Amino acid sequence: MIDLYTAATPNGHKVSIALEELGLPYTLKVLDLSQGEQKTPAFLAINPNGRIPAIVDHELDGFAVFESGACLVYLAEKTGQLMPTDVKGRSLVMQWLMFQMGGIGPMMGQANVFFRYFPEKIPSVIDRYQGESKRLFRVLDERLKDHEFLAGDYSIADIANWAWVRTHRWSGVDVDDLPNLVRWRDAIRARPAVQRGIERPASRVDLTRDGDAGAQRFAEEARRMVEMGQSLKGTAP
C-alpha cells in the first residue's frame, strides 16, 4: 500500500493520475496548504522541503519519495509501466519529463502567482511568464505534430506535462492556436484513469463550472498565502 500526500495542484495530480493508471492501491492523504500542513514536523520527516506531493511505500519498509518527478519515476520503475526499459526509450521519457520539471512547471507556476495571486499587478512580469509558458507550449505542439504522445507510447512524460497544460486558462495562456497540443490534451483528458486522478483530490475551483466568482474566491485565498510568505509554486485549480 502507498500513502499519497497531496493537494489539488498540477504536481499533486501528476502522482494521483499515475497511481490510477498503474492500478496501484493507495491511501489519499490531503494536506491543507493554506493551513501550512505541509510544514509540520510530521510531514517534513517525509519531505524535508515541505512541498507536496510525496509518497510512502509501505511495501518497502515505509520508503518515502518526494518531488513529483521522482515519484513518477519511482512508480514507473516499481511497476515496469509508463516508461520503457531500453536506454533510448527511457532517455526520451526522461527528457520530456525534465522539460516539464524545469520549464513548464516553473514558468506556469510563476504566471499563476503574478497573474492570479500577487496583490500588485506588474504587466511586464506577467507578460514575461505568460510568454515563456506559451513558448514552451509551442515546443510541445511542434513535438506532437508527428507524435501521438511525447516519447513513444503514453508515459509519465505525458502525465507530467498534461497535468500542467490542462490548467493553461488559470495561467492566462490560450492554446486555441496550437492544434496538436489541443488534440493531445483532449485525448489524455478522455482517459478514465486520468479522470479519476484529477478528482483525487478535486480542484476547489473549476473555471468551466464556477466561473469568475469561484476563481476570484480561490485567488483571494491564495493571495493571503502569498502575503503570509508561504510558497505557492504549483498552486492551481
Image (cartoon, rainbow, N blue to C red):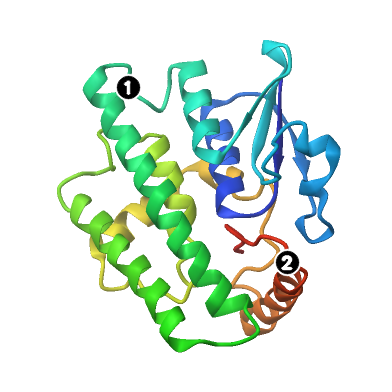
Of residues 135 and 144, the one nearer the viewer is: 135
Q: Position of residue 76 (x, y in %)?
A: 47, 24
Q: Mark 2 to mark 1: distance in Å?
A: 41 Å
Indicate the secondary structure of the residue bearing disc 2. loop
Question: Badge 1 local density, few (<14 within 10 Å), some, or many (20+)?
Answer: some
Q: Residue furthest left?
A: 146
What residue does disc 1 label? 84
Q: Quadrant of residue 29?
A: top right
Residue, x 26% and y 67% (percent of image)? 178
Residue 11 versus residue 227 in the image, above or below: above
Say if residue 50 shows up in the picture: yes
Amino acid marked by disc 1: Pro
What residue does disc 2 label? 229
Amino acid marked by disc 2: Gly
Indicate the secondary structure of the residue bearing disc 1. loop
Query: Which is nearer the N-term, disc 2 or disc 1?
Result: 1
Residue 121 versus residue 78 in the image, above or below: below
